[in-house]
Structure formats: structure tokens, C-alpha cells
Amino acid sequence: MMPPLTPTSSLANEKKPELLNSPREVHCLLYDRASGKVVGAVALDQVKTTLAEQPDYFAWIYLLRPESEVLQQIKQDFGLHELAIEDTTALFQRTKIESYGDTLFVVFSTVNQNVQQDKLEFGSSNIFLTDRYIISVRQSDALCEKQVASLCEASPHQVMYGPAYIFYALMNCLVEQYLPAIAHLHERLQDLKQNIFTDKFHRQTLIDLYGLKEELTNFYLAVVPTKEVTCYLIAHQAVELLEVIPNEVIPYFRDIQDKVLSTLDIIQSQSEMQKSAMDIHMAQVSLSQNEIVKRLASWAAILAVPTLISSVYGMNFDNMPELHWPAAYFIVLVIMVAISSFLYYRLKQINWL
């Protein structure tokens, strides 16, 4: 557990808190808006009182897989909407932004690479934002909170903008994790090249390509709503939003929007490459089958000549004078070999054999 907040006079001397790695975590960090520095940690039930006593402070409350009692407590303490609280209990929600009075509620899609199962896992980070606090709730493993805490400690000037900067730092960290996921999918496609460009049909190759297509589609669907959220944050000029996100922070969201658009472009290009790879593999298989059919047809044509000649002489007609010729047998054999050899030569010339 985090140490309780010390009295106000000694807050500046409080040891810098560190985020823990317990299965369930509740962290409440207080920042001084005037200096942009973290001043200490406080128990969840003391955040509201402390903020009321210290108008220059704002809080970052980070909850990892919280108990329902904790969610109900923050709902009561901060007047959060019950529908938004309900959304925080889901493992995955579509990226969206909603306004509940003076509180912004943002659901942001997360992507995590499962190395053991060699697949991507999708989740969501839920964020409540006002000008006095930011509450981030996650049901999946924490990926960004330590990095954001370190960034805020190293960038007090930006933290002076308030909770909006921590909100940006969280979104930026989550967006940057899209790139390793894309790189992982690209490596999987590269690994399949050996089986794609082959004459032999590999059923597992098609299964892997289809699985890759499914993950790319899910990835795209998870990321594309983020573009709408960033557009809303950049372009919306409502008074309640300007109180939560000052104009000085908006350029930071433009940076996130650029990264999101780049991510979407890469996903679409990877999807096109995957589709082309599947088409090429099927084309290679079709060409291989055509070559087999051509060889079978060529040998069937060659064997048809001796079969036709021998079948004529096997009909046992009485009036067949050449049957009584001494050299008839050898002449027929020579004719069959000559015609068959000629056909073999011609078919070889046109690459049918």
C-alpha cells in the first residue's frame, strides 16, 4: 500500500511514490499545480477532502482491476455517472469520449502483445477527467502508468497544465504501444513468406494468413475510433471542455492524432500486403496444379498413339493384308515409336513436359 499523505507542511519532503506491481492496485498521487511536482500519496478516502483543503493541488487516481467497492467509493466521492462506472468493469470497450457535466469520460483502446500465445490482446483504459483530478481505471495489466509517472516527475513544467497533461501522457503512451504490435504482425507476415512463394499447397499457411487478417481487422477497429476522439479534443471549443483541457495542451493532442493516423495507414498497408500474400499463394498453387494437368495431358496424348494403333489391330478383322507381312510387326512398332517421339519432342518444346 502507498504511504498515507503527510501533513501539508511536510508534503514537499515526502518520498517520491512508486507504482507497485500487485494484482490489484489503488494509487492516489497529488500534484502541486504551481510547481508541477508530485507532493505525495494519499488514501483514496482522503482525496476529496485534501483537494478541498488545497485548491492548488490536483490528483491522479490510478486503479488496476479495482474491487466493486472501490468503484462505488469513487462514484460517490466524485459524483461519477453510473453508466460510466459500468463501462469501467468491462475488459474491452470501444474507444469513445463522453461528457457528464464537468467530467469527461474517455475509453481508450489498448493493445498488448501476448508473447506466449503469439497473438495480440485488446483491452481498454477508462479515464475520468476534470480540472481537479484524473482517474484512470484498467482491468488489464498495467503498461503505461509507471512511464507516465516518471515522465511527469521529469517534466514539472508540463504538469503545471494540470490533469490534462497526465491525460495526454497516458494517451500518448498507449498510442506508442501500437507500433510494436504492428511490427509483430509484420514479422509474422515475413515469416510466412517461405510458405507463400512455393508451388506446394500448405493448409496451415492459409490458416495463419487468415488469423493474421483477423488480427489486423480487430486492430483497425480498435484504433480507428481514436481518430474521432482526438479530433473532438482538438476541435471542440465548448466551455466545459476548455476548463478541463486548456489551449496549451491541445497541440499535444495533435501529436497523438498524427501518430494515430500513421498507425491506421500502416495497418491498412499491412492488410493489403496480407491480402496480396494470400492471393499470391493461391495463384502459386493454381499454377502448380495447371502444370500438373499439362503434364498429365501431354503423357495422355503420347500414350494415345500406340493405344489407338494397337486397338485397331486388336479388332481381329479377316481382311487385314498387312497382318501377313513378315515385317509388319516391326513396321508398326517403328511407327508408334516415331509418332510418340515426335509428340514428346513438340510438347517438350512448348514446355508442357
Image (spheres, rainbow, N blue to C red):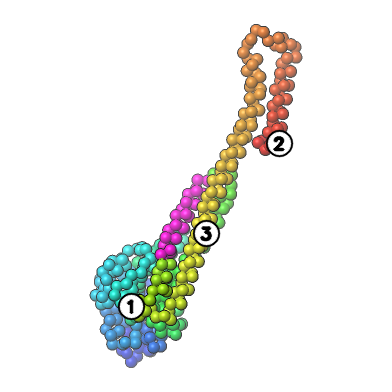
Task: Tell me, for residue 349, which label it has, or none.
Answer: 2
- 86 horizontally vs 232: left or right: left
Q: Which residue is mark 1?
A: 240
Q: Residues within 10 Å of mark 1 (few under 14, many from 20)?
A: some
**Farthest residue, direction left:** 76
Residue found 64% across the figure and 16% down from its top? 312
Q: Earlier in the sequence, mark 3 or mark 1?
A: 1
Q: Is residue 100 left or right of residue 246?
A: left
**Marks 3 and 1: CB-CB under 8 Å?**
no
Image check: 36 left or right of 82?
right
Quadrant of residue 342 within the rendered picture: top right
| Label 3 or label 2, whichever comes before in sequence order | 3
In front of the other: 19 or 30: 30
Amino acid type at mark 3: Ser
Q: Residues within 10 Å of mark 2 (few under 14, many from 20)?
A: few
The local secondary structure at tag 1 comes to helix
Q: Are marks 1 and 2 in contact (CB under 8 Å)?
A: no
**Disc marking residue 269:** 3
Judged from the image, the secondary structure of the residue bearing numbered disc 2 is helix
Corner quadrant of residue 287: top right
Q: Is residue 114 visible?
A: no
Q: Is residue 101 magenta?
A: no
Please state the horizontal and vertical placement of residue 141, each as a whole percent of the image: 39, 67
Give percent across and percent down for residue 106. Answer: 36, 70
**Highlighted range, magenta:** 202-226
Relative height, residue 285 to residue 108 (above, below)? above
In magenta segment, residue 225: yes
Comparing marks 1 and 2, which lies closer to the viewer? 1
Tell which of 9 and 293 is nearer to you. 293
Q: Earlier in the sequence, mark 1 or mark 2?
A: 1
